[in-house]
Amino acid sequence: MASPRGVEILLVQSDDAEGQSLREDFDAIGLLSVIQTVPDGDSALAALRGQPPFVAAVTPSLILVDLTIQERDESLAANLELLSEIKSDPQLRSIPVVVLTNSHAAADALNAYSHGACSFVCKPESPVERRRLIHRFSQYWAQVAQLPHAIEHRGDEPLPLTPTALDDLGPDAISPVDVLVVDDSEDDVVLLQEAFSDCPLVNFVQTVPDGETAIRYQKGQHPYAGARRPGLVLLDINMPRKNGFETLTEIRNDPELRQVPVVILTTSKQESDILRAYSTGACSFISKPFNFDTMKQIAQQFAIYWTSVADVPVEPN
């Protein structure tokens, strides 16, 4: 089993037994490491800021907030407040936060993404299914996404990809995720389409060449009136007219669009770009590989994560 390298988690979990179970699940996989478990949002902020009783600040690559629903309104409100506090703090906002919950409510997913969550993950009741979900979760964040602070521990490369077949998802019907691709390079778009050609769980609803067009498309403005709104945006950084960071900022500042997950897909591996992307509200940051076979593996992991692990928010009718 590989030892955890570079992907360290701060776990916010009020139930000690559940926290220990999650830690054991992650340790068994060996891709992610829970470096600190705290019971609530106040303790999480104290740990991140190095305030008493913590003698030094923890610097996780990822924060996992386990949202229990026994006291539903109080629990949800407290964790949304934690999300808002982290995303408003210049020292903390670059750390991705994932909500882990036993809620399948669409309104909860919308609220979580609107408050800055990078993804919203529902825990299965079955222990076998939960371990499978934790495995897929670990693969995505350790082997596909680039994370802040992880480079300090593992060098500038993510862990090698572990092949995962889409047919491992089983026969259960999983709704495909509709993706808007924003990239000005026609060659890159063609390669991307070829890489995802064996991924029926991802549906490219539209490809646009710049940020201005992406905003118009999502808002249904001319010439995209009545266009199918995406469940997720796959966004390049370097584009004309409005670059990826400017586009992401506009999406996150728009009440109509801010809950839409945005994944940065770029050639950059610069730590400064990774930090800026998460600080601006990216849900994850993926570096385009030079090897096409690796891109196909990334496409599979991307499809698995955003359809069978994370819930993509659905607008109410």
Image: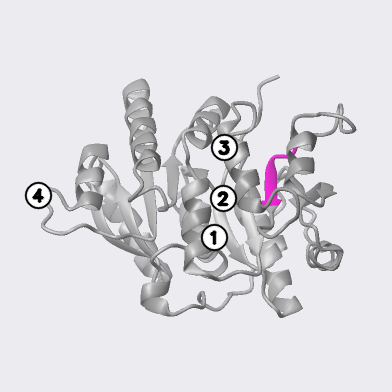
Q: How would you rate the neighbour count of disc 2 (Cα within 10 Å): few for under 14, some for 14-19, many for 20 or more?
A: many
Q: Is residue 180 left or right of residue 123?
A: right
Picture residue at 64% right of the left edge, 32% below the top: 257
Query: Disc 1 to disc 2, how far (Cα)?
Result: 7 Å
Quickly name the residue at label 3.
252
Q: Give the magenta part as a residue range.
A: 229-234
Query: Disc 4 to disc 1, how far (Cα)?
Result: 34 Å
Secondary structure state at the residue bearing disc 3:
helix
Magenta highlight on residue 164: no
Q: How would you rate the neighbour count of disc 4 (Cα within 10 Å): few for under 14, some for 14-19, many for 20 or more?
A: few
Mark number displayed over residue 309: 2
Magenta highlight on residue 233: yes
Labels 1, 3: front one: 3
Picture residue at 70% right of the left edge, 45% below the top: 174
Query: Disc 2 to disc 4, how far (Cα)?
Result: 34 Å
Quickly name the residue at label 1.
136
